[in-house]
Amino acid sequence: MIEFAEVAHGYGGSPLLAEMTVTLAPGSFHFLTGPSGAGKSTFLKLCYGELVPQAGRITRFGQSHDNMGRDDIARLRRRIGVVHQDCRFLDHLTLEENVALPLLVANRDADPAELRELMAWVGLSAQRESLPPSLSGGERQRAALARAVIMSPEMLLADEPTGNVDWDMSLRLLSLLVELNRMGTTILVATHDLNLIRAAKAQVPTRVIRIKDRRLHLAGAEL
Ligand code: ADP
Ligand code: ADP
């Protein structure tokens, strides 16, 4: 689904990540871990095309990164849903309107019944008309997840989705991700929460990519 071949990236002339060769296969569930500043967000941005690699090749859905026009990028954004770390809501729109925004952008009508069902799936039926600033961290994360999957993406990327929520809410978010994966969605979650990774491993086959010394390592049995 996404393949990295000898990819390198950095900022302002200083290298950050190098020699990245990894395949995220269809239907797989990967965690990406490593200390703050290691480059997890950068890796995710390379995956969904917000950053262009400085070296190497990234192939997404069979298409090389250096062979993509504007339309290809737009299509890619519909096939890969992203839960950003900071959620990025429009505070003057209701939660449900925020969740439906990707449809607006794609010029599609929201099906009210489907939207209701999606809000119920993430447990936010009672908050549909709420404004984002009034919500808790866990509610925001679940709404961000709903927004990321509203276009039925083949792949979902999440950047520290449990960064600001308690353990019970982390498990609740995880169960939604596991459910998506069981239905066939390819998942990549950046996190430094090892307990979350352990909890996931008890439910679905997962692989762990660790960033260490600017390189990707597939972690062994210690997790
Ligand atoms: P992580 O998600 O693991 O915390 P990031 O990918 O966000 O790591 O950042 C890795 C490093 O790259 C950090 O030192 C960060 O400050 C730096 N960095 C990230 N984005 C930029 C940018 N746009 N310009 C310059 N430096 C950046
Ligand atoms: P994250 O770890 O999720 O990237 P940050 O707060 O480190 O969160 O970064 C927020 C945004 O700022 C990101 O888009 C990142 O690329 C950018 N950024 C991070 N570090 C730098 C930096 N040193 N210079 C410029 N932009 C940066």
Image (cartoon, rainbow, N blue to C red):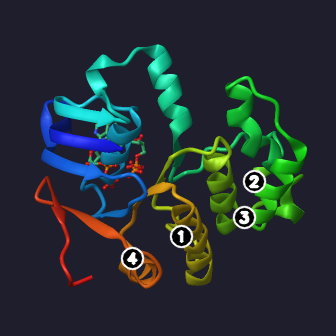
Residue under numbered circle 3 = 122
Dividing the picture into quadrants, the one containing residue 88 is top right
Position of 222 with respect to 6 (left or right) is right
Task: Please tell me whether mark 1 or mark 4 is closer to you in this view.
Answer: 1
Question: Is residue 134 at all visible to an observer of this figure?
Answer: no
Mark toward the start of the polypeptide (1 vs 4): 1
Tell me the kind of residue under disc 4: Ile
Q: Position of residue 215 (x, y in %)?
A: 13, 54
Q: Which mark is residue 133?
A: 2
Task: Please tell me whether mark 2 or mark 3 is closer to you in this view.
Answer: 3
Q: Nearer the viewer, residue 62 or 123?
A: 62
Circles 1 and 2, Cβ within 8 Å, touching? The answer is no
| Ligand 1's quadrant | top left
Residue under numbered circle 1 = 178
Q: Secondary structure at mark 2?
A: helix
In the image, residue 84 above or below residue 208: above
Spatial CA distance of label 2 from label 4 is: 29 Å
Q: Label 1: how many residues lie within 10 Å, few (<14), some (14-19) or many (20+)?
A: some
Mark toward the start of the polypeptide (3 vs 4): 3
Mark toward the start of the polypeptide (1 vs 3): 3
Q: Give me the residue at 74% from left, 29% from top.
A: 104
Position of 115 with respect to 22 (left or right) is right
Spatial CA distance of label 1 from label 4 is: 12 Å
Q: Nearer the viewer, residue 165 or 30?
A: 30
Residue under numbered circle 4 = 197
Mark toward the start of the polypeptide (2 vs 3): 3
Circles 1 and 4, Cβ within 8 Å, touching? The answer is no
